[in-house]
Amino acid sequence: MTKNTLTITDNRTGQGYDIPIEHDTINAMDLRQIRVNEGDFGMMSYDPGFKNTASTKSNITFIDGGAGILRYRGYPIEQLAEKSKFLEVAYLTLFGELPDKEAYDAWVYDIRHHTFLHENMKSLMQAFRHDAHPMGMFISSVAALSTFYPEARNVMDPEVRAKQIVRLISKVPTIAAFSYRHSKGLPYVYPNNDLTYAGNFLAMLDKMSESTYEVNPVLERALDVLFMLHVDHEQNCGTATMRVIGSSQTDPYTAMAGAAAALYGPLHGGANEAVLRMLVEIGDAKNVPAFMEGVKKRERLLMGFGHRVYKNFDPRAKIIKGIADQVFEVTGRNPLLDIALELERIALADDFFIERNLYPNVDFYSGIIYQAMKFPVSMFPVLFAIPRTVGWLTQWQELLGDKTQKIARPRQIYLGADERDFVPMHKR
């Protein structure tokens, strides 16, 4: 009869070990029993970048990179993007089930009525330099919220946690909009709780002297869909950071500031900005073939193609490409789109790119749409952070409810000097 174990033979000692297999994984601590002698620390695995190490068991997001599948709580992202709304998806992600009308209305009411920031927060944000990066302001302001809600440190109280979750989801669009207005030298616009989540954000960005701001429904829906696509994406760099910091049981504002700081990096939340810069550098669709030859010769970098997880077309990229035409009907066609389409056409027809699984990812088209909607590139990571707040908080809440989790403390392989005696400075 087949045993659900992995048999390892240590050729140094001839000793054999049976390691239990669960969910197609082995417990890393089971390797510790493999030793050369009693004084040996025991075997560890070495995995830079955690490319093949699972740190948690989760019920939130499922990804099949080979098949190009992304699901939140079992629901395909394609269905949610077509039929749902961002706050409905946020509820689903956080609580595990789609809400009925009563639950949804109560949820929307709570979110809409926690959008305002303490006036001292406004003063704090006004103290930033006139050219402060919006993402730097966002990270700092989210961290500062922990000083306004000191009860948030009681993270093991479910009611306290629920309150902070609502506060953060409600307030991050306000922080983001204030950061944007600050960078433009414009007065901050207070939230309008009569508008939708995306509509309110757009109004806080653009409203000037008009008594009422009319939100364009096409742009409002496009932004709502973009928010849905970025809610959660398994254990990426920012989410892993949220869990690592959260494992110390600090408050969610501090943990989320750390997650947002991870997102700030150009290899994470700044990737769509890199795509945009690449398209601007190419300049014209007629220059694409030469650029792609440079990529094949390792002379140029192709941004927005390929993904650590997806070995097929990123399903989010398909959805974004689908809404692009609707956005361009309102904003006018972004001239960079022709370059992007030619890049995609060549990549999908050339064996060099096909063999390396270099398909367009979510960053490839999102930056073009954001630019068409008049967002500066400095706002791109902030636009990512607003919806990802939901995913970060869901992962944080799941972490705190998982009794198998401990404070994060990775191991290392020490390759430094052996013990040596201190040498006084005059003898060095």
Image (cartoon, grey):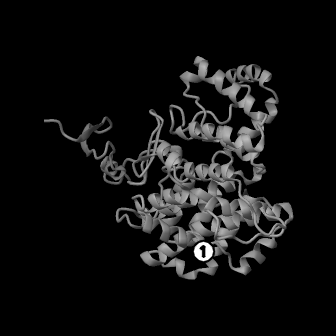
Secondary element under disc 1, as helix, strand or loop, is loop
Residue at (42% x, 58% y) in the render: 98
Q: Residue furthest left?
A: 1
Q: Amino acid at mark 1?
A: His
Q: Quadrant of the C terminus?
A: bottom right
Q: Quadrant of the N terminus?
A: top left
Residue at (33% x, 37% y) in the render: 12
Can you see residue 248? no
Count of picture labels: 1
Measured as percent of width and height from the top left, residue 314 is found at: 54, 37
Q: Residues within 10 Å of mark 1 (few under 14, many from 20)?
A: some
Rendering quarter of residue 2:
top left
Residue at (48% x, 35% y) in the render: 68
Measured as percent of width and height from the top left, residue 219 is found at: 68, 50
| Mark 1, residue position | 114
112 vs 423, nearest the viewer: 112
Rendering quarter of residue 360:
top right
Relative to residue 357, is residue 224 depicted above or below?
below
Measured as percent of width and height from the top left, residue 244 is found at: 51, 61
Relative to residue 151, is residue 78 depicted above or below?
above
Can you see residue 392? yes
350 vs 352, nearest the viewer: 350
Relative to residue 322, is residue 115 depicted above or below?
below
Answer with left or right where residue 85 lies relative to residue 176: left
198 vs 123, nearest the viewer: 198
Measured as percent of width and height from the top left, residue 351 is found at: 58, 17
Relative to residue 162, is residue 130 depicted above or below?
above
